[in-house]
Image (cartoon, rainbow, N blue to C red):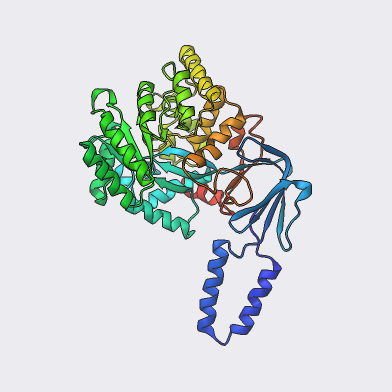
Amino acid sequence: MRLRITNSVTHLTSSLLFHLQKRRKLFSTLCALWFCLLGQGLLAQPMLFTNARIIVGDGSVIEQGAMLVDGESIVAIGDAGELSSAENGTTFDLSGKTLIPGLIDAHAHIGYQGRNGWGAENYTQENLIDNLQQYAYYGFVAVFSAGSDAPGLAIEVQSRLALQQFQGARLLYAAGMAPPGQGPNNQFLDQALAVEKSTGANILWGLENPEQARAAVREVAAQDFEFIKLWVDDRGGSQQKLAPSLYEAVIEAARSAGLRVFIHQQFAEDMPDLITAGAHGFLHGRIGSSLNAAIAEQLSQSNVFVIPNLGLGELRSEAIGADRFLGQVLSSELRSQLLPGANRRELSVSRSPQLEAEQRESFAALIDAGVDIVLGTDAGAIPNHHFGYTGHRELEIFVRLGMSPMQALQAATSKAANHLQLDDLGLLQSGYSADFVILDANPLEDIRNTRSIMDVYLKGKPVDRAVLQQQWQGQ
Ligand SMILES: [Zn+2]
């Protein structure tokens, strides 16, 4: 299903042509404007998507629903019988299909994973765009890249996206802060420092004392950063752990400048003091026996979100190259690294029943306390943890550990949008951006049905997934 330029638009174009044919210069200018507007979707016809099951994103579902899209926005949503097509609009009958809001990955690191390998050498504007296109391919409409980006390049990519020069997930990025010369895992740290060197950008801000930490926050606020990623981790003794006096200074200064602070921490025991200091969220939930009901209650009371980020560990030893859903986007080179037997990867990985039980209990404590669990994957932080695909796998893990499919979808839509302050994403509601996914099968019956992607729309325009797939498989 693709947007069609209907008769009335064609008629208008030919009238313009008739009146302007003698004024060629003006004509060509107007033509450029016309096609620009078409390209922006501003002259797009309203589209009615009807007879679909609509998963709104807030926990509700319309079993036989309809959604009206005009330009870049959803303008009405309701029961199929109550909503009719606008004049000159196009109607799509989606009987048997399901609509969900576009998905959001609230923890990733874009730029480093390329089509044929991983590392600083891939960190280019072209590759950042490619990564965002892969997210879109998999139904993701926004991604939070956590403290590993060159801001100049990220801003350029954001503006190219705003101009609709390509279709991809929206990019949010953060200033990384840690003790001087530290932060990301040791393998990733080398790559981030290499990008600092090659781009001349400041990616990681080293914190030495509270006064200087506050100055660093003011500096990034002046550069229009909206988020700070803070590492509080000694990396098993190989790095220095950020002192409480420093994270307290950063969080306090960030809050007064209107920035949000997301934490990488290794242990649940560190969470209470960080919550008290005012952290907004945790990028690694550390689900398990140490993340207990008392911490869950404190998280809930403070409206602090948690990203469990479990797939990062689980998928490392799985032969994910054999999964056709991932195979769709992989070059033969990368796929060969991920097949059974390659790099000690196995088709099915056995899990410790005890660890599984601990995780289920901890997960239940978070859900019972009403903590906002948000989807994030850490995709891109290590080689071969692929964008978009890993988000679908994380949804499966959420359901395996005790969430309902509806709760898992909320974690990947409205809850993620809320904590990332993406005010027009995460819900299929009037006034929201027309960023959505059409699924062939119902994910409420089986969460793996999020894989049955028929179409992805960004700002009211379909993503040409077949072209992207062809392009990637040819590499
Ligand atoms: Zn990360």
Residue at the far right: name it. 81
Dividing the image into four quarters, tell me where ligand 1 lies. top left
Say if 316 sits above or below 88 in the image. Answer: above
**Could you say which quadrant of the image residue 396 lies in?**
top right
Q: Does any portion of residue 451 appear in the rendered image?
A: yes
Residue 234, image x, y percentages: 27, 26
Residue at the far top: name it. 354
Q: Residue at x 50, y 83 (%)?
A: 25
Q: Residue at x 52, y 82 (%)?
A: 26
Say if 383 sits above or below 28 in the image. Answer: above
Residue at the far bottom: name it. 22
Residue 188, image x, y percentages: 30, 36
Q: Does any portion of residue 413 appear in the rendered image?
A: no
For residue 157, side relative to residue 466 (left or right): left
Q: Residue at x 49, y 28 (%)?
A: 300
**Could you say which quadrant of the image residue 107 lies in?**
top left
Residue 457, image x, y percentages: 58, 50
**Could you say which quadrant of the image residue 312 lies in?**
top left
The residue closer to the viewer here, 274 or 126, is 274
The residue closer to the viewer here, 448 or 143, is 143
Q: Residue at x 38, y 36 (%)?
A: 262
Residue 397, image x, y percentages: 52, 26
Say if 170 sits above or below 13 in the image. Answer: above
The residue closer to the viewer here, 200 or 241, is 241
For residue 206, side relative to residue 30 (left or right): left
The residue closer to the viewer here, 178 or 390, is 178
For residue 23, side relative to residue 294 (left or right): right
Figure disc tally: 0
